[in-house]
Amino acid sequence: MSGSFKTIIAIVVAALVIGILPLMAVSERANDQAQVIAESRVSDFVNNAAITGSIKQKNYDDLITKLSATGNTYNVNIEVERMAENIGVKTAWIHGDVMGENSTYKIYTQSIEEDLKRVGLFNLNRGDKVTVTVKNSNNTIASNFRSFVYGIGGQRNYDIVAAHTATVTKSGGR
């Protein structure tokens, strides 16, 4: 009886290895493909905003649509670091063109989305830094397999994260 029990256990373990390992490999590959797509789309969106000097509602909607095509849901965070104009002018001790120290302030996703909904456009100034970070908000099949096989639970790890930053080279139209 102990010999048949060992045989049954061996068959069950073999079936799990033959069944689960290929599924894990395929699901990890799907995550890798989604990662590449997310990085590419975020990079294109940020570079377009930096070159044109504006974030347009159509481009933002296209980003969301293209990210959704991967079969995952994403949290999109946009941050614009804007240079405050002439925050202070120092007196010129040596040169007549010495300006004061510049300071920056940040504008976040909610304010940008409000402008996009209201006007369909968020204008950027030359020298602004645009950062977009995208994280998947759903559990992917690969993360579920990892949790099952490795016993990792209760901790949220993002499988797909893409971020890109660019400096605006052209001020947007008013």
Image: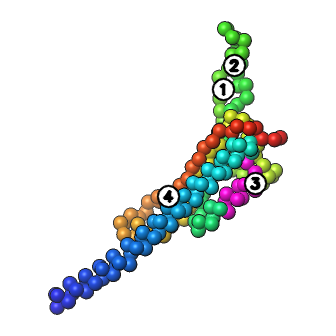
Q: Residue at x 73, y 29 (%)?
A: 85
User: Which residues are the magenta region?
Assistant: 55-65
Q: Secondary structure at mark 2?
A: loop
Give the residue number, with chain letter if any, for mark 1: 102
Q: Amino acid at mark 4?
A: Tyr
Q: Are marks 3 and 1 in contact (CB under 8 Å)?
A: no
Q: Residue at x 33, y 76 (%)?
A: 17
**Up-down: is 30 above or below 167?**
below
Q: Amino acid at mark 1?
A: Asn
The alpha-carbon separation of the residues under discs 1 and 4 comes to 36 Å
Question: Is residue 96 rendered magenta in the image?
Answer: no
Percent coordinates x, y for residue 47 in the rendering: 66, 46
Percent coordinates x, y for residue 28 in the rendering: 45, 65
Numbered label attached to residue 158: 4
Q: Nearer the viewer, residue 49 or 148?
A: 49
Give the residue number, with chain letter if any, for mark 2: 99
Q: Are marks 1 and 2 in contact (CB under 8 Å)?
A: yes
Q: Amino acid at mark 3?
A: Gln
Q: Secondary structure at mark 1?
A: loop
Numbered label attached to residue 25: none
Give the residue number, with chain letter if any, for mark 3: 57
